[in-house]
Image (cartoon, rainbow, N blue to C red):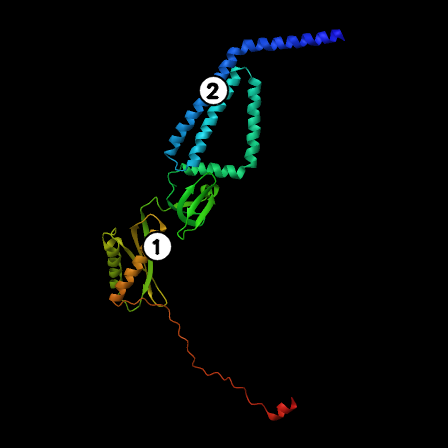
Amino acid sequence: MKSQLTEAYNLLIEKLEGWFNLIITNIPNLVLAILVLATSYFVAKYVNKYVSKLVAKRVQENSITNMIGRLSAVVVVLAGLFLALGILNLGKTLTSLLAGAGVAGLAIGLALQGTLSNTFAGIVLSFRKKIQIGHWVETNGFSGEVMDINLKDFTLKEADNNMVVIPNKLILENPLKNYTLTTRMRIFLECGVGYESDLDLVEKLTKETICNTFDQIESPDDVEFYYTEFGGSSINYLCRFWIDAENALEKLRAKSKAIIEVKKAYDKEDINIPFPIRTLQFDNKLDFEMPEMDNKQFSNN
């Protein structure tokens, strides 16, 4: 029994001496690893601030700016950690960490597939110059002003003041019409005049009225006018012209103004804008009186 205790004691002392010698031998590497970790921590802080300022110049959303800054800081810290493990000759530990990180990343990615897709889509949308807060856009069946682009969703305010929240993934995968990217919009005005109207006068009057209504139209020749068909009660035409506008609301206002002014001009020149009339004619007499029944037949019943 004594010999076994002595042997165990000697093994313990030998093990402790080995560890002590190992620590003494690796003190320079340990100090260097600690310095690397500390340096990476402080560098990560400056990288976070610098990247956040750099991203803020192109992205208006604070949530996305902060997230990108923090991600850059995490990358710096992880790089310092891997470098420190390499200095300590812990290659196997480093390999295990990388393998574990890969498996964990795969599991998290599968579990949060929808959330991550919206997050990355939000980052991509934030860096697109053609989609900015304040633009008037139309997408996924909705039209309105872009109010917010964050890591989860895309917020629109429609013309009726309703807020529409759309997942970022749908914005990135579907077509988007941006009215703000151009300062000009084309107005389509369709109408009809009576068959007795002077068609040359109608065309001239319509062009002049549109030209005088909108300052951006320099000449009546800039207004397009085409007769399109002989309708059931009128000769119909299509009038097209360009205006300076950046959203659909300005386009609606311009079309409404054009309709008002054209109607006034037609009234002054006694130009008729006909509308369908339905005439109901009752020229047949309906007999609502019941025929007299034979008394004999009545008695038999």
- Describe the element under mark 2 as helix, strand or loop: helix
Q: Residue at x 45, y 48 (%)?
A: 164
Q: Seen in the image, is 64 located left or right of residue 108?
A: left
Residue 144 shows in this picture = yes
User: 261 above or below 244?
Assistant: below
Viewer-proximal residue among 54 and 102: 54
Considering the image in quadrants, where does the N terminus appear?
A: top right
Residue with the mark numbered 2: 38
Residue for point 29% across, 53% down:
241
Q: Nearer the viewer, mark 2 or mark 1?
A: 2
Please determine whether, in this image, residue 204 is positioned above or below residue 74: below
Q: Nearer the viewer, residue 281 or 199?
A: 281
Q: Amino acid at mark 2?
A: Ala
Task: Identify the amino acid type marked 1.
Answer: Leu
Q: Tell me if I can see residue 226 in this picture.
A: no
Residue 264 horizontal side relative to residue 153, left or right: left
Residue placed at 46% from the left, 29% from the top? Answer: 71
Res. 280 mark = none
Q: What's the residue at 47%, 18% (across, down)?
A: 36
Quarter placement of the C terminus: bottom right
Q: Position of residue 2 (x, y in %)?
A: 75, 7
**Which percent across, then down, holds residue 169?**
48, 41
In the image, residue 292 sits, relative to residue 241, either above or below, namely below
Q: CA distance from mark 2 to mark 1?
A: 62 Å
Mark 2 neighbour density, 10 Å: few (under 14) some (14–19) many (20 or more): some
Describe the element under mark 1 as helix, strand or loop. helix
Furthest residue toward bottom: 296
Q: Position of residue 296 (x, y in %)?
A: 62, 93
Q: Is residue 116 left or right of residue 297?
A: left
Q: Dot 1 corresponds to which residue?
A: 252
Mark 1 crowdedness (10 Å alpha carbons): few <14, some 14-19, many ≥20: few
Give the mark nearest the N terminus, 2 or 1: 2
